[in-house]
Image: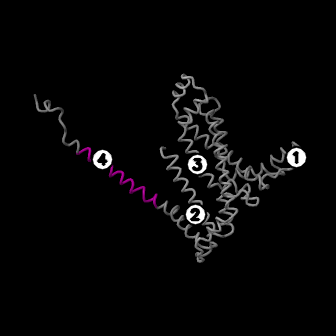
Amino acid sequence: MSAQHANGPAVDPAAPRASANGRLRGRGDAVALALVFLPPALLLFTVFVALPIVDAARYSLYNWNGFGAPERFVWFKNYLDLFGSRVFRISLTNNGLIILASFVLQMPLALMVATMLADRAPLTGTFRLLFFMPYVLAEVTAGLIWRFIYDGDYGAVASIAGWFGLDPVYVLADPDVAIYAILLVIVWKYFGLHMILFIAGLQQIDRSLYEAARIDGATGWQMFTKVTLPLLAPTIRLSAFFSVIGALQLFDVVMPMTGGGPSNSSETLVTYLYNFGITRTKFGFGSAIGVVLFVICVAFAFFYKRTAMRDD
């Protein structure tokens, strides 16, 4: 019997060397790709993200009108004025109301409609398109459309009030009602995005799980709570993340509708930055608002990623 058969299959001594060479070659390719693509990405990030953040933090320490180099160093006065501002507290409250409306109205409605449109049945594609169209519409355009709808003289609200013999209703001119009218528009505008996210998540769930639950005698509500919700949880968490970040950055819908009015009752953090920082040429104060908004967004994103999305 030969030595090869006596001692088992022959081992090629060159094989480990070839495997090691393959790993080194793969590592070298990864380094080469990083050297090609990483510098442009770092350059763009530095120019358009890092440097503006640093400049905003620096300008927030000055009383600066935007003309020439900032010279009047005021330390943290802009921040003290900001946290003592009544309008800033109104803006924070309105952003909180937008987040609450998204969690209480927008996401549950989107999930309910998504469960009805997830299966490929006749006309589901048409209904998906109809519900998704408001999201495709530009924010400024949507705001202008709804401003006309809410118009107390010529809009749809005025027509409905006239049918019932009521006095004209000026929704966007009422400080107690304007923000709630905007909330309705926001729910309508971004409803389609969450619906599409939920449909995509529902289509990833194995249909056999529902068949097994049905065989075991589970009701529709039990299948929804015990099968759909747990398996859709990553999508729900992602949708909630988009809702909060979008609410904190909301600007384009509010400005054409109310501009933050009346009496600053519909201000958000970004409209507050624009109205009290940019338009009044108080760029130091506006920079302080931007820094606070940036800190809130980053803190939320970091906390949410480390807690709610740590397993996603």
| Element type where label 3 sits in the image | helix
Instruction: Tell me the kind of residue under disc 2.
Output: Val
Vertical placement of 285 versus 228: above or below?
A: below
Is disc 2 surrounded by few (<14), some (14 to 19) or many (20+) residues within 10 Å?
some
Query: CA gap, disc 4 to disc 2?
Result: 45 Å
Camera-side residue of 303 and 254: 303
Question: What amino acid does circle 3 point to?
Answer: Phe
* Residue at image point 63% right, 37% down: 128
- First-in-chain label (1 vs 3): 1
**Do callouts 4 and 1 mark residues in contact (Cβ within 8 Å)?**
no
Residue tagged 1: 166
Instruction: Kindly state the secondary structure of the residue where label 2 is placed.
Output: helix
Circle 2 sits on which residue? 291
The mark nearer the N terminus, 4 or 2, is: 4
Determine the CA span between mark 3 and mark 4. 39 Å
Circle on res. 196? none
Amino acid type of disc 1? Answer: Leu
Q: Earlier in the sequence, mark 4 or mark 1?
A: 4
Residue position for label 4: 23
The segment highlighted magenta reads: 17-42
Q: Is 31 one of the magenta-colored residues?
A: yes
Residue 58 x, y percent position in the rendering: 55, 70
Residue type pointed to by label 4:
Arg
Q: Looking at the image, which is closer to me, 265 or 253?
A: 265
Q: Is residue 218 above or below residue 15?
A: above
* x, y percent for residue 147: 76, 52
Considering depth in this image, is 31 or 276 the residue closer to the camera?
A: 276
Q: Residues within 10 Å of mark 1 (few under 14, many from 20)?
A: few
| Dot placed on the residue nearer the N-terminal end, 3 or 4 | 4
In the picture of the structure, the residue carrying the numbered disc 3 is 242
- What secondary structure is the stretch in magenta mostly built from? helix
